[in-house]
Image (tube, helix red, strand yellow):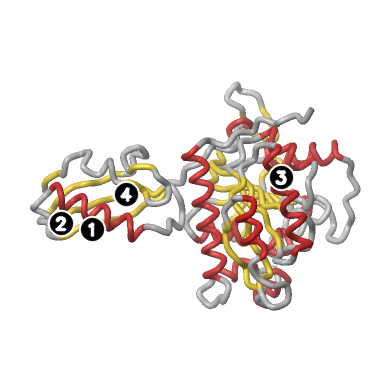
Amino acid sequence: MSSLPADCLKSVTFPELNRTLGSLSAVKKCEIQDGTAQITIELPVPGYPHKEELSQSIEKQIRSVSADVNQVDIEYTLNIKGPESGAKVGLHVKNMIAVGSGKGGVGKSTVAASLAYGLQSLGAKVGLLDADVYGPSIPHMTGSTGKPEVREHLNSNGSVVQRIHPVEHDGLKLMSIGFLVPEGEAIIWRGPMLHKMLTQFVAETEWGELDYLIVDMPPGTGDVALTLSQMLSLAGAVVVCTPQKVALLDAVKAIGMYQKVNIPILGMVENMTGEIFGRGGAEQAAADQKIPFLGEVPIEAEVRICGDERRMKDLFTEESKSKAALESICSRVAMEAAKVYFKKPATTTLEILQ
């Protein structure tokens, strides 16, 4: 066995991320055994769509520095990076991503649940926070039941504190007001109560170590986004809309709201694409706003049925007609979050309009 030069791959670049393997300390193994180069590369993002291109660059570089190589075997591992969104409040959450819309009824919760299950299927540790207090639907869509538990924890200074433990279901960690009130009961709260609940669900909950915490936002522009922008370093926001113009007008307002509170816009998702509502409206709006377009969710009956029947996870089985489209959106969201992080860490400074 012989070793290749320790820095022979440091200048190879991750396609689209514009960061080198050296800058991310991504080369975990680089050696030759019996004419075979054995390479292990740590990927910083799940569902990385350019592995084939990266592999070609690595093989080309290996062959340029060693004539002894007959074969190049590359293994990829995963160590997701992010702005440590929960650090300000003592959480170990790398990327907190808000999923919002300018209006209700566009499938925001469907997209949020799909992102959670999709990122999990790509190898990430994921939590899902239902911040839509007035219309919590995540418990129903995921089929999760039970109540969050409050348990005592010992702080580093020796004091005892109480922490909320989220409901765990299908490998996801979940929090929602829907776990705490009877199904169908209306929540009638003013802003301060909403702020208190959100603080408890975020800062006082034992989320554990997560790569992603997806936040299903309430529709419109209001208190929740302001609270999150002040409390956390969000990785970014995904804006959901349907193709028709009336929905796009409100989606543009949501984009403006996120920009005003310095939450990076990861892009737009067009939901319910098809003959009924049309196609392409969100893609054009994203181009007009100069933000990424993340993909389309076709208006398939399967998506509605899985949500109604409390089994959103089934959208990511091999038999699912919607799997390819949803997985593509999930990998694009992860990629855009990584690009924001590597370009400039997300900030939470709130701009006060004068």
Image point (18%, 47%), residue name: 31
Q: In the rendered view, does 82 fall on the left or right side of 239? A: left
User: Real-space Cα distance between discs 1 and 3?
Assistant: 47 Å
User: Real-space Cα distance between discs 2 and 1?
Assistant: 7 Å
Q: Is residue 337 above or below residue 323?
A: above
- Of tags 4 and 3, which is closer to the observer? 3
Q: Amino acid at mark 2?
A: Thr
Q: Amino acid at mark 4?
A: Ile
SS category of the residue bearing label 1:
strand
Mark sitting earlier along the chain (1/4): 4
Q: How many marks?
A: 4
Residue 36 has which mark? Answer: 2
Mark sitting earlier along the chain (2/4): 2
Image point (60%, 21%), residue name: 157
User: Real-space Cα distance between discs 2 and 4?
Assistant: 16 Å
How would you rate the neighbour count of disc 3 (Cα within 10 Å): few for under 14, some for 14-19, many for 20 or more?
Answer: some
Tell me the quadrant of the picture where the C terminus can be found: top right
- Badges 1 and 3: C-beta atoms under 8 Å apart? no
Mark sitting earlier along the chain (1/3): 1
Name the quadrant containing residue 270: bottom right
User: Real-space Cα distance between discs 3 and 2?
Assistant: 53 Å
Query: Of all residues shown, which one is farthest toward the top?
Result: 157
Q: Position of residue 104 (x, y in %)?
A: 79, 59
- Badges 2 and 1: C-beta atoms under 8 Å apart? yes
Q: Position of residue 291 (x, y in %)?
A: 59, 51
Mark sitting earlier along the chain (4/3): 4
Q: In the rendered view, does 6 fall on the left or right side of 106? A: left
Q: Which residue in the protein does label 4 denote?
A: 41
Q: Which residue in the protein does label 1 denote?
A: 73
Q: Is residue 209 above or below residue 252?
A: above
Q: Position of residue 203 (x, y in %)?
A: 68, 36
